[in-house]
Image (cartoon, rainbow, N blue to C red):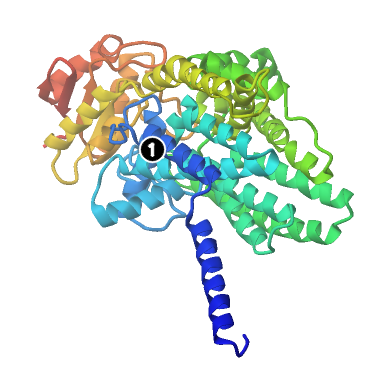
């Protein structure tokens, strides 16, 4: 400032004008941010569409078990280390499960707003949006903003991602947290602030606790740490290594506890089976590592040919190598992530193919490759300039994927195949008295959906847990009657079955166990005999 009033006034006006310009620049939405917000909106539309659908779709069995754990947190105990289901009798029915992030958050919503079966879907969908954002920023760091837009949009529209992200499952939390954690770590690796490292560690650790396949992202972190060592940046590598050991110690301690819990309480059930060390390498080899199941799931459920073609193109034609060594290291991240996910698949192929939501760990690299493939086709022979031809091609690519993949496959996966199970549960809820225990057979034997919607505790039939096979009926009526009498002795009050209930060998209960129905007609009181349902009161006076 000077003593000249006019000069001071001019300088003040210039300062104010400069400040106004800076504030206007900060308040103006950048084009890239506007595109990201648009992609997030698209993701919201697809994930929240029909969000109130009951838990009766293709993933019903696993969703209902997760929902039961949320119920029991809210109704019986808030101790997150004791997840409990309701389909193995009066309990306690603790099981060895993942760290229950989605179910616990849902239980908190029940406590605040009352019980609604779709709250779990809503929580999962919000985690899905975190994945969209984190994937976008990770792709921008690895490649560039244009590829980030394409990858995030691919994830937003991918049928598999939509289905898993809108299902009451732990997998959306897993992928969201490990992707967020890895993006924060990659930012730190690229020269970001020191506070990013503990945040990345915490997010990654929670993600793996939510579901073990998240360890695939840990392999990518290890890849970046090795690059530090090669660059002789041993101080950064040592710090990340120590925090990584702490993370693995916490993860190992929790899953050791989960195994102990599952083996210590009836029904002695630890989630997950079908690993290579259980079945043996040659069993996997004879079954070609279940790749036929992978193909069928990919074509008819999860991706469809348009998305599969885009993924293949993007995988085969990555962005051109750049001169910056650090950027070259980052550009390889989707390949390292995919390789780690494949190793996990090879070790757990039977489990993953039996429970296809476990494919979710693949969807980050798949979305990146898919976005790359779409980018290549859209800019074919036109260069990266945003010309009318590029825009038209991009619109055509999006239309083809929507019409031939997203709409039909999501509709297929969301088909309410277990609706009769829900109707049976509703009927049992109407008939049950306080404290009653129910026995229920859903359309798919072993699915506890009817027990869940009865709002009571009870058993699936045939009763399952541990190593017991409960997805198929026993061989004869005498064994089934003995099982039923054992449940009656344990306090079962109501028995219900959907009339279309069939086991995995496609045997209808009413036909295969017609002798059980005759026995119930003689020893129990028939309460419902409709076109779809059959319900008896079996408790003795």
In this rendering, the answer to whether 254 lies above or below 214 is: below
In the displayed orientation, state which residue is furthest to the bottom. Answer: 3
**Left-right relation of 159 to 329:** left
In this rendering, the answer to whether 388 lies above or below 213 is: above
Q: Position of residue 239 (x, y in %)?
A: 76, 61
Q: Nearer the viewer, residue 94 or 20?
A: 20
Q: Secondary structure at mark 1?
A: helix
Q: Is residue 216 visible in this depiction of the protein? A: yes
Quadrant of the image containing the N terminus: bottom right
Q: Position of residue 91 (x, y in %)?
A: 34, 46
Q: Position of residue 58 (x, y in %)?
A: 39, 24
**Left-right relation of 7 to 269:** right
Q: Is residue 215 visible in this depiction of the protein? A: no
Which residue in the structure is indicated by mark 1? Answer: 65
**Left-right relation of 203 to 224:** left
Q: Nearer the viewer, residue 109 or 426?
A: 109
Label tally: 1
Q: Nearer the viewer, residue 493 or 424?
A: 424
Q: Residue at x 55, y 82 (%)?
A: 6
The crowd level at tag 1 (other Cα within 10 Å; few <14, some 14-19, many 20+) is many
Quadrant in the picture for residue 533 = top left
Q: Residue at x 33, y 21 (%)?
A: 415
In this rendering, the answer to whether 9 lies above or below 46 is: below
Q: Nearer the viewer, residue 447 or 260?
A: 447
Quadrant in the picture for residue 123 = top left
Q: Position of residue 194 (x, y in %)?
A: 69, 64
Quadrant of the image containing the C terminus: top left
Q: Residue at x 19, y 18 (%)?
A: 519
């Amino acid at each position: 400032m000077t003593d000249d009033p006019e000069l001071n006034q001019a300088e003040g006006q210039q300062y104010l004008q400069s400040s106004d310009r800076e504030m206007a620049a900060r308040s103006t939405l950048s084009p890239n941010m506007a595109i990201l917000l648009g992609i997030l909106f698209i993701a919201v539309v697809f994930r929240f569409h029909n969000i109130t659908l009951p838990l009766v779709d293709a993933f019903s069995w696993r969703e209902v078990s997760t929902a039961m754990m949320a119920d029991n947190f809210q109704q019986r105990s808030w101790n997150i280390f004791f997840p409990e289901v309701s389909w193995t009798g009066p309990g306690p029915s603790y099981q060895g499960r993942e760290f229950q992030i989605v179910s616990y958050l849902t239980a908190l919503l029940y406590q605040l707003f009352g019980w609604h079966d779709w709250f779990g879907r809503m929580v999962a969908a919000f985690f899905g949006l975190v994945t969209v954002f984190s994937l976008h920023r990770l792709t921008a760091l690895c490649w560039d903003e244009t590829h980030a837009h394409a990858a995030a949009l691919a994830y937003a529209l991918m049928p598999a991602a939509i289905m898993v992200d809108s299902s009451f499952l732990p997998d959306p939390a897993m992928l969201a947290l490990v992707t967020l954690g890895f993006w924060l770590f990659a930012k730190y690796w690229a020269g970001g602030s020191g506070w990013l490292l503990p945040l990345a560690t915490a997010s990654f650790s929670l993600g793996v606790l939510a579901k073990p396949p998240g360890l695939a992202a840990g392999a990518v972190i290890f890849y970046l740490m090795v690059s530090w060592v090669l660059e002789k940046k041993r101080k950064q590598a040592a710090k990340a290594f120590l925090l990584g050991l702490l993370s693995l110690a916490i993860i190992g301690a929790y899953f050791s506890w989960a195994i102990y819990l599952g083996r210590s309480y009836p029904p002695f059930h630890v989630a997950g089976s079908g690993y290579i060390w259980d079945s043996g390498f040659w069993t996997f080899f004879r079954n070609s590592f279940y790749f036929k199941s992978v193909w069928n799931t990919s074509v008819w459920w999860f991706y469809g040919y348009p998305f599969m073609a885009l993924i293949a193109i993007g995988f085969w034609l990555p962005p051109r190598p750049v001169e910056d060594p650090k950027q070259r290291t980052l550009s390889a991240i989707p390949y390292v992530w995919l390789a780690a996910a494949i190793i996990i698949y090879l070790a757990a192929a039977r489990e993953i193919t039996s429970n296809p939501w476990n494919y979710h760990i693949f969807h980050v690299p798949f979305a990146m490759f898919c976005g790359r493939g779409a980018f290549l086709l859209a800019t074919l022979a036109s260069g990266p300039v945003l010309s009318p031809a590029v825009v038209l091609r991009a619109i055509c690519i999006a239309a083809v994927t929507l019409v031939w993949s997203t709409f039909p496959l999501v509709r297929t996966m969301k088909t309410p195949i277990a609706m009769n199970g829900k109707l049976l549960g509703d009927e049992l809820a109407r008939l049950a008295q306080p404290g009653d225990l129910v026995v229920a057979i859903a359309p798919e034997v072993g699915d506890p959906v009817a027990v869940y919607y009865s709002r009571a505790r009870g058993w699936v039939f045939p009763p399952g847990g541990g190593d017991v096979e409960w997805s198929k009926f026993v061989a004869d009526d005498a064994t089934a009657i003995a099982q039923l009498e054992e449940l009656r002795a344990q306090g079962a009050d109501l028995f219900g079955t959907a009339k279309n209930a069939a086991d995995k060998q496609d045997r209808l209960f009413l036909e295969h166990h017609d002798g059980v129905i005759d026995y119930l007609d003689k020893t129990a009181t028939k309460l419902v005999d409709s076109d779809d349902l059959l319900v008896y009161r079996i408790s003795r006076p």
